[in-house]
Image (tube, coloured by chain):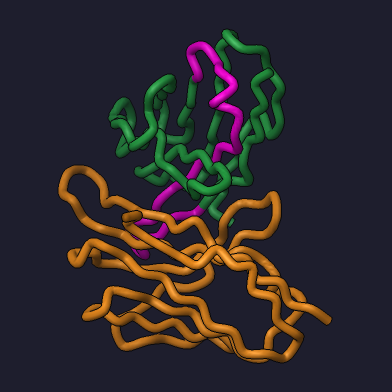
Chain colours: A orange, B green
Amino acid sequence: RKEVEQDPGPFNVPEGATVAFNCTYSNSASQSFFWYRQDCRKEPKLLMSVYSSGNEDGRFTAQLNRASQYISLLIRDSKLSDSATYLCVVNSNYGGATNKLIFGTGTLLAVQP
Amino acid sequence: DAGITQSPRHKVTETGTPVTLRCHQTENHRYMYWYRQDPGHGLRLIHYSYGVKDTDKGEVSDGYSVSRSKTEDFLLTLESATSSQTSVYFCAIRTVARNTIYFGEGSWLTVV
């Protein structure tokens, strides 16, 4: 089982739709969680951190469920410009000089006009 | 923009040749990383550095070495390139304040 798992998609949705991505992680000691966005042939860019109480940034809402070990990303009122791959990232501290970041393989979103 | 520059951005090389990728950062970050990204595998850590001359292996370090002689530069060397090392390589830094990773624009390497 992968440490971080995402549905690869693609998710094809019309403009204006609401879409949700889930991501599960296997290490219950994981401490930090993030969503990154990656456009085709570009570097991943931080979209938002995910906090225990859930957090919102405009049309984007991230939630964490520690009991079930998953995080989610909700995008409301989808725009064409939201088309990208969304990466789930989990930070687990295994000790030593650095925390260990585990990346999911990403979920591809295609917003259709 | 985390002030990260990678070079070269694109390179085609022959099997068996050495290749060095350079990552340069301008904001004095302590932690630097090299990842590779391949379809179906996501981003995988090759090596990382937690200071000048302080480096350690990641999960896919075989065939790669790194050096960090200055805070601003982190070099990734493929000692003898193989076709399995054809990939896109991302350098990254970690900010201590927010404990988040920021990536460079990537280096596309093709080994023929």
Magenta-highlighted residues: B78-102
Look at 64% across and 74% down and name the residue there. Answer: A11
**Residue A12 position by quadrant:** bottom right
> Where does the N terminus of chain A fall, quadrant-wise?
bottom left
The residue at the far right in this view is: A113
Residue A60 lies, in percent from the top left, at: 55, 84
**Residue A34 position by quadrant:** bottom left
Above or below, A82 against B31 in this view is: below
**Residue A71 position by quadrant:** bottom left
Q: Is residue B100 magenta?
A: yes
Left or right of A45 in this view: A15:
right
How many numbered dots are placed on residues in this image? 0
Residue A105 vs residue A58, the one in the foreground: A105
Above or below, A102 against B104 in this view is: below
Residue A103 lies, in percent from the top left, at: 42, 55
The residue at the far front in this view is: A1
Look at 24% across and 64% down and name the residue there. Answer: A30
Look at 43% across and 79% down and name the residue there. Answer: A72
Left or right of A51 in this view: B37:
right
Q: Is residue B15 magenta?
A: no
Above or below, A108 against B107 in this view is: below
Residue A53 lies, in percent from the top left, at: 31, 88
Left or right of B41 in this view: A42:
right
Residue B66 vs residue A33, the one in the foreground: A33
Above or below, B84 against A6 in this view is: above
Look at 50% across and 49% down and name the residue there. Answer: B42
Residue A59 lies, in percent from the top left, at: 59, 88
> Where does the C terminus of chain A fall, quadrant-wise?
bottom right
Left or right of B102 in this view: B51:
left
